[in-house]
Structures are given as structure tokens and as C-alpha cells.
Amino acid sequence: MFSARLTIDPRFAIGSVERRLFGAFVEHLGRCVYNGLYEPTHELADDQGFRRDVVELVRELGVSTIRYPGGNFVSGFRWEDSVGPRDERPRRLDLAWHSTETNEVGLHEFADWLDLVGSDLMLAVNLGTRGTAEALDLLEYANIPGGTARSEQRIANGRTAPFDIRMWCLGNEMDGPWQLGHRTADAYGTIASQTAKALRQLDPDLELVVCGSSNAQMPTFGEWERVVLSHTYDDVDYISCHAYYQEKDGDTGAFLASAVDMDRFISSVVATADHVGAVRGSSKRIAISFDEWNVWYQTRFEAEDKISGIDNWPVAPRLLEDRYSVLDAVVVGNLLISLLKHADRVRSASLAQLVNVIAPIRPSRAARPGDRRRSSPSLPPPGSPRAKPSTYGSSRPTTRRAGTGGCRWWMRWPRTTTPPARPPSSSSTGRSTTRPRSSWT
């Protein structure tokens, strides 16, 4: 008979677990936004067009921070298109996903949706086809109270108080040849540093994320991080990591070991960042924002979903709507454990994505609550103790290393009380700084 021994020693602490580790990602891709979280013709839609059943499920998950609006989408995005009267917003071609973007949902609408679900915004700027000036305009529009051209434009568009967005991403996957405006590490590091310095001149308290490698298999991995951080080390707080996994050729064992690859990925990026800091004689430590991670069957996308044709630009096509198995759920759970094991350096993470597109939530076309479907068994069912909404307490959970016995970690999440009633949301008021949180208990 086999036996196992687990020793937990609270003296071996890795670090506190930031609430941002339980974040997600919403991109204007496929049916994530349109016919996903926003479907005004659905009988469960509210007066703004947001599906109430989706809002309920996102609140159950307790998503802390949501990265938006991309993703590859952001490298061709003109933020000005997505504000102002809806009937005056232009329809644009989205080259990243070969689709048509209607701009029905923009910064104002998405901020209203975030108020409904109780999450914070992590906003990405376009450093692919645009640059520092456009990023500054967006920051002025979003965060300056008034008295300037862009802030007064926001007020005229119905939002009196600033959005007060704290966390900003400097582009997306700029190392990838598929990315609009793809750059070398040196060229990207230069514009990222310039943009970060400019944004901080306007709002010194921003938290900034610079692009790391799109994945650990990129031929420039490691060197990309070194060069980019050599430019931006003093200007940013985080470097991003992205990783997706899938079972290949029926190799279940390798798939189940995906978290081992994630561990190596994180350790390599940490070592590179610390090397750059040591060379500079800096005591600062760069954190990791693992702002895209999940199981994604990319081979199926290339074979079945990918859209092409000069005359074929659909609105909200079905893309990346993978159907997950229990095996996939086990891998997702292991990946989350890896993020927790590195909680001293991984301070933010975003499960990609949130609705329909490689997502834990797949809303049914039917309006009956019993017809709601969840695509990922890795997430707890409604009513289970882990999914019960509660207010995030003032104490932080802690990840610790065990002294012996082979178990590398454990987590203590604060047990708290029922969330207070949310203040009413209004387009003329700012985001509540006392928004109740949801956590897993």
C-alpha cells in the first residue's frame, strides 16, 4: 500500500498572492464581445445590451482585472473610433482576425460593463501602427478630470469623472511576425521607453507593462527580454508573458506536464530581468504580468477557423470556440498552480479569454438559465463553495513552500463576508474605489 506525507511549514513563504492573479482577458475577437458579453437583441440583455447571465457568471468567477481590448486586435485599433455617439462610429476592418469591427462597444461601454461585474480595467495601447502621441491622447481622455481637449471630449461623451485607469500595457506581442507593426527588440524597446516616460509625465502613478516574448518557443526568446528591458527597465513595472498549451499527437503525458514548461518560462524571464537589473546596479525588481494563458487548440484554428478573402470580413464570426474536456481542465488547474508557485514575481495574470473565445463561459443562445453552458470544467459550478461570491478581505493570501514531502506550495485565501450592496452605476460618476470583490473561499 502506498503512502504519502505532506509537511507544511509556514516559515517558508514565497510571497503574498496578488488579487490580480485571478484576472482575465477580453479582446474584440470572434464572439467574445459581440454576441458574447454584449447581445442587445437577446431577451436576457439589459438596457445597455449586456447579457445579464454573462454578468452573473463573471461575478461568480471573481475576476479581478480584465485586459482590454487586445491582443492582436489592439495593434490596428484607433481608440477614437470607439467613443462618441454610436451611430457616428466608423466600421473598420480588423486585420488581425480578418473581421469587421463595428465599434458598438468602446471604452465607455466596456467601463460600464466592468462596473456590473466588479472588475478593474487593464488597458492596452496600440504601439503597432500608432505611437506615443496617440497613447498620450488616450491617457488624457481617460484620466484627466477636465479642462483639456481630450478630457472635455470625454465629458461631452457622457462621462464626467475620469475612468482612472491604473494599469496600462505598452502594445501586444511585438516580437511576433504576425503582429501589425512588428518590430525588432531594439526598435520596440525604444518606442516603449519613450511612451512609458511620456505617460508617466502625465500620470506618475501608472503601472506599466512592457511586451515580453509571445511564447517561450520564439527564436528571439530571452534575447528579446534582455534587449527590451535594457531600454525600459527604469520605466516599467512589469514584463508580460504569454503561453498556450494543447495536447499534440495524443501525447497526454506531455500535455499534463504543461505546467513544467510554464515554470521554466517564468524562471527564465525572472533570471533575464534580474540580470539586466544587476548590470544596471539597480535594486528594483521587475514583476511578471502573465496576461495571456490557457489551453488553446491553435492547430484547429489554422485548419478550420481562419478567415481569408478580400471580400470576406464578417462581423463577430465564430472563432477559437474550443470545447474543453476534463483533461484540459486538469491542465488549466496545474497552470494556475504554477502561477501561484511564482507569486513572488508573477503579480498579475489574465486567463485568455473570458467569453466564447477559448473561454470558461459559453452563453447559450437560449434564454433559460438551465441552458447556460460552461466550456471549462476547470472552473467551479454555480453554488459550490469556491464559486461563492464574497468580499475580498484586507489580509492577503500567502503562497508557501513546504519543507519536505514533495509538495511545493499551499495557499491560504481569506474567508470573508457577504459583499455589500454595490453603489449605483452612472455614466456621470466615476468608478467606485470601494467596489466589492469576489474571491474563492
Image (cartoon, grey):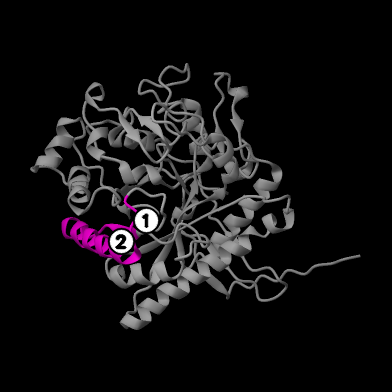
Q: Which image quadrant is residue 400 in?
A: bottom right
Q: Which image quadrant is residue 105 in?
A: top left
Circle 1: is it few (<14), some (14-19), or many (20+) Cα within 10 Å? many
What residue is drawn where x is 32% and y is 37%?
111
Q: Which residue is mark 1?
A: 174
Region rendered in magenta: 181-209
419 and 433: which is toward the camera: 433
Per the image, is 37 magenta? no
265 and 350: which is toward the camera: 265
Query: Of helix, strand and loop, which mostly describes the magenta segment?
Result: helix
Per the image, is 198 magenta? yes
| Secondary structure state at the residue bearing disc 1 | loop
Query: Is residue 38 depicted above or below 320 in this figure?
Result: above
Q: Is residue 84 left or right of residue 43?
A: left
What residue is drawn where x is 60% and y is 59%?
337
Query: Is residue 90 depicted above or below 228 in this figure?
Result: above
Q: State yes or no: discs 2 and 1 in contact (Cβ < 8 Å).
A: yes
231 and 340: which is toward the camera: 231
**Mark found first going from the N terminus, 2 or 1:** 1
What residue is drawn where x is 50% and y is 71%?
268
What residue is drawn where x is 39% and y is 30%?
310
Q: Which image quadrant is residue 298 in?
A: top right
